[in-house]
Amino acid sequence: CKAQNNTIQCPLNNKGTDSLSPREQEILSMLGKGETSGEISDKLSISTRTVETYYFRIMNKLELDGMKELRKFSIQNTG
């Protein structure tokens, strides 16, 4: 996925959310709804560090460069 014109574009080679585990999709959705790492960790009964590990895994799978792109992607691609 690459940032272009204030949107995150994923190529058609299936680098979208289908490559994410159910838990990664859940965390991405929560992030897209504006929840903080602390809120996500509380709701899922996991540590904040574990949430951050999920962020890192999601960014790697989606080929995103940092939290700014991850947040933008999560807002645009989750509902």
Image: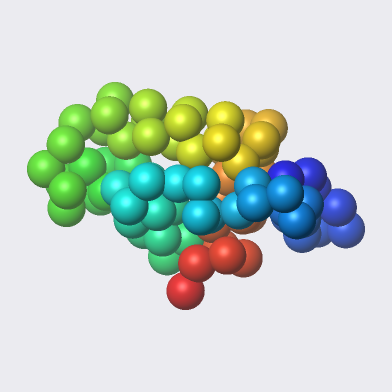
Residue farthest to the right? 5
Considering only vertical position in the picture, is 27 above or below 68?
below
Give the left or right position of residue 67, taking residue 63 as reference: left
Considering only vertical position in the picture, is 62 above or below 12?
above
Where residue 42 appears, as percent x and y from the top left, is: 16, 46
Identity of the residue drawn at 66% across and 37% down: 64
Give the left or right position of residue 42, taking residue 1 as reference: left
Give the left or right position of residue 73, taking residue 50 as reference: right
Identity of the residue drawn at 86% across and 52% down: 4
In which quadrant of the rendered image does the N terminus lie? top right
Where residue 23 appears, as percent x and y from the top left, is: 30, 48
Identity of the residue drawn at 29% across and 25% down: 49
Identity of the residue drawn at 38% across and 34% down: 54
Where residue 51 appears, as percent x and y from the top left, is: 32, 35
Q: Would residue 35 be visible to someone looking at this image?
A: no
Image quarter of residue 47: top left
Where residue 66 appears, as percent x and y from the top left, is: 62, 32
Residue farthest to the left? 45
Give the left or right position of residue 21, taking residue 5 as reference: left
Residue farthest to the bottom? 79
Q: Would residue 1 be visible to someone looking at this image?
A: yes
Considering only vertical position in the picture, is 54 above or below 10?
above
